[in-house]
Image (spheres, rainbow, N blue to C red):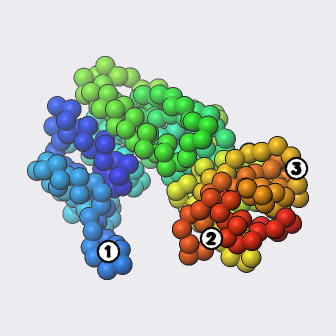
Amino acid sequence: MGTPDFAVPSLERVAQSGHELVGVVTRPDKPRGRGQQMQPTEVKAAVESLELGVPILQPESLKDESFQRELADLNADLFAVVAFLILPRSVLAIPKLGSVNVHPSLLPKYRGAAPIQWAIIKGEEETGVTIFQLSPRVDAGDILIQEQVAIGADETAGALYERMKVKGAELLVQAISGVADGSLSSIPQSDKGASRAPKLEKSDGQIDWTQSAQDIRNLIRGTNPFPGAFTLWRNKPLKVHRATVAEGSGEPGTAIDVGNRLVVGTGGGTLVLDEVQPPGKKRMSGADFVRGYRIEVGEVFG
């Protein structure tokens, strides 16, 4: 069960694992792009390209009784869930071995829809992948496998996402084998140390220049590529794709160096804006932005 590209490596590894794949559940096709043509989910497209030859179920609602009957008729022993919807109790009750989920964090930390992004935003130096048994409580089921993953000092959420989806697929197959042969026992998940990782909205990417330079840089990394970090500039949004912490101090949000780079003051230290994107323009270096738009010392952002 899965929808976005994060679930595709898991689908591929399960299909190659020797375990019998009896069906795939994903979201319905949706119109996309300028022409609004109906497009399959990444998981459905992968099933078709791999020619797996298994049923693909695309329910509008997981509570639909006809869908649940069709799902039960597949006679699956175990459900493997990756980047999908919250399963209702009636669906959780179907497989005799239960359901396992891939979650890209060290649970109970960062329960929720955006654990990769929030780990970077919060300045974590490591995160991990947890394979756990689904329960009615979101991201709170018993843990089967957990493995740490280091976060690179310059790594963005997008880059970490690519690594985590591969690691998640590897651990998922291990968990399926362990559950199937009874060699893997679960550990109850504690609520101690639990934290939330809610879905990010566009507004979450807005830079608060009163924060420290390091915190702002973490925000820029954690929201890259989505939803993207931005600051207001001349009453318009200026996207900030990359930045570096620098020594010095200055009024928060104020340009203090516009020589061969753009340096802005923060609530603690200063930040070099290495790559920005003005409205309607392509990405450019901070130096090109300074020259092209005649940024002066004292210009205010935010």
Q: Name the residue at 69% across, 47% down.
A: 244
Residue nearest the observer in this picture, 161 or 181: 161
Q: Earlier in the sequence, mark 2 or mark 1?
A: 1
User: Dot 2, how many residues are within 10 Å of its Cα: few (below 14), some (14-19), or many (20+)?
Assistant: some
Task: Indicate the quadrant containing the C terminus: top left, top right, bottom left or bottom right.
Answer: bottom right
Asked whether the residues under the numbered discs 1 and 3 touch, taking CB atoms below 8 Å apart as contact, a structural biologist would say no
Q: Is residue 87 above or below residue 185?
A: below
Which numbered tag is attached to residue 31?
1
Residue kind at label 1, given as amino acid type: Pro
Element type at mark 1: strand
Q: Position of residue 214 (x, y in %)?
A: 74, 45
Q: Is residue 280 above or below residue 291?
A: below
Element type at mark 2: loop
Left or right: 102, with 289 as reference point: left
Q: Quadrant of residue 29?
A: bottom left
Q: Between marks 1 and 3, how big is the CA–CA gap?
A: 49 Å
User: Dot 3, how many residues are within 10 Å of its Cα: few (below 14), some (14-19), or many (20+)?
Assistant: some
Question: Residue beneath label 3, please?
Answer: 249
Residue nearest the observer in this picture, 228 or 38: 228
Q: Earlier in the sequence, mark 1 or mark 3?
A: 1
Residue kind at label 3, given as amino acid type: Ser
Judge whether residue 86 can be spotted in this image. yes
Q: Position of residue 212 (x, y in %)?
A: 79, 49
Left or right: 135, with 47 as reference point: right
> Which numbered mark, 2 or 1, is in the foreground of this view?
2
Left or right: 207, with 158 as reference point: right
Element type at mark 3: loop
Q: Position of residue 47 (x, y in %)?
A: 20, 52
Q: Residue furthest bottom?
A: 35
